[in-house]
Amino acid sequence: MSQQTQGILFALIGFGVYALHDVLIKLLGGLYSPFQIVFFSVLFAFPLTSLMLIRDTEPATLRPVHPWWMAVRMLVIMIASAASFYAFSALPLADTYAILFSMPILVTLLSIPLLGERIRVHRGIAVLVGLAGVVIVLRPGESSLTLGHLAALVGATCSALGAVIMRKIGRDERNVTMLLYPTMATFVVMGATMPAVYRPMEGMHFAMMATVSVLAFAGMLFMIMAYKRAEAALVAPMQYSQIIWAVFYGWLIFDDWPGLATMIGVSLIIASGLYIVFRETRAGASRTTPVLETRSRSATPGIPRVSLAIRLLGRKR
């Protein structure tokens, strides 16, 4: 089996693990506040990520080089985590994924003002097609837009902004700083909400909370193995395999089945994302390749983005 094939298989496994992670979030979200779930996700994830943090032996302080950008990134990561977790609990899995799949489109748009990226006609059309797909999924005027839909949009937008900011300042900041500040901020802020939202947990639910963090960490490790073996252009599109898991788990566990509008919308969003990735692989089509360099997904608080994890582990691609 070739290295590229191995990379694709590891990516498929990784996104399958992430899908199971999201199923647990949806199950827990029906019982507990998203703030409580995020808080315990970060709490249980920190011992795992600490193993990565200690690998950074660079002799320097933890003071950020770009404090204002770091503050914005901390804020959007916290919002993205809580919003995405709420969206999973409030919407069918397929609908949530459809909206979160718009992240590459949003990364492309945000890269124009923040990275100086130029969007030519072909990618511009792909962005419009993807946005049309989002509108079809939301179906404004035909069905009531809920707080869950808004949360998914906020989660995708904030995740995209966090990814672009990391792309902008990542070369100047220490790896440990890029991970530690958002993690600690999320832990402190979500912890401050506990007196208002905390609900005592049964032993099984407590174990599920811990499993969420373990699955997020395992998914990240599979993605690292994928990117070590295959090009980003082959690995990144594998995220869309999650829609298959969404349909399967939605039918099996939640008695949900995506409607025709959702499937049409998600098809347009996936087509748009695939074309954006394709354009970024072409020489001269993109100066910063923001989508390919993102190498991550939303809704994994306390776990570093894959690109940052690769850097922490001493592997740069």
Image (cartoon, helix red, strand yellow):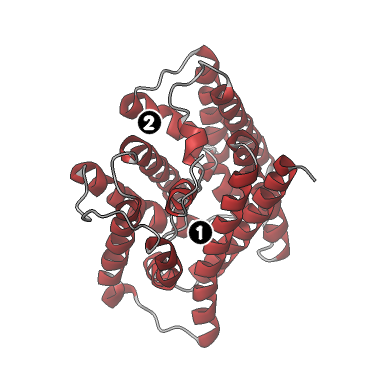
Q: Amino acid at mark 2?
A: Leu
Disc 1: which residue: 90
Q: Is residue 155 left or right of residue 184?
A: right
Badge 1 or badge 2: first in the primary sequence: 1
Q: Amino acid at mark 1?
A: Ala
* Closer to us: 208 or 146: 208
- Is residue 273 depicted above or below 93 in this figure? above
x and y percent of residue 134 in the render? 53, 35
Cα–Cα gap, marks 1 and 2: 27 Å
Task: Name the quadrant containing residue 186.
Answer: bottom left
Point 57% across, 29% down: residue: 277
Q: Is residue 76 left or right of residue 271?
A: left
Point 30% across, 74% down: residue: 194
Disc 2: which residue: 110
Q: Residue 223's mark? A: none
* Closer to us: 185 or 171: 171
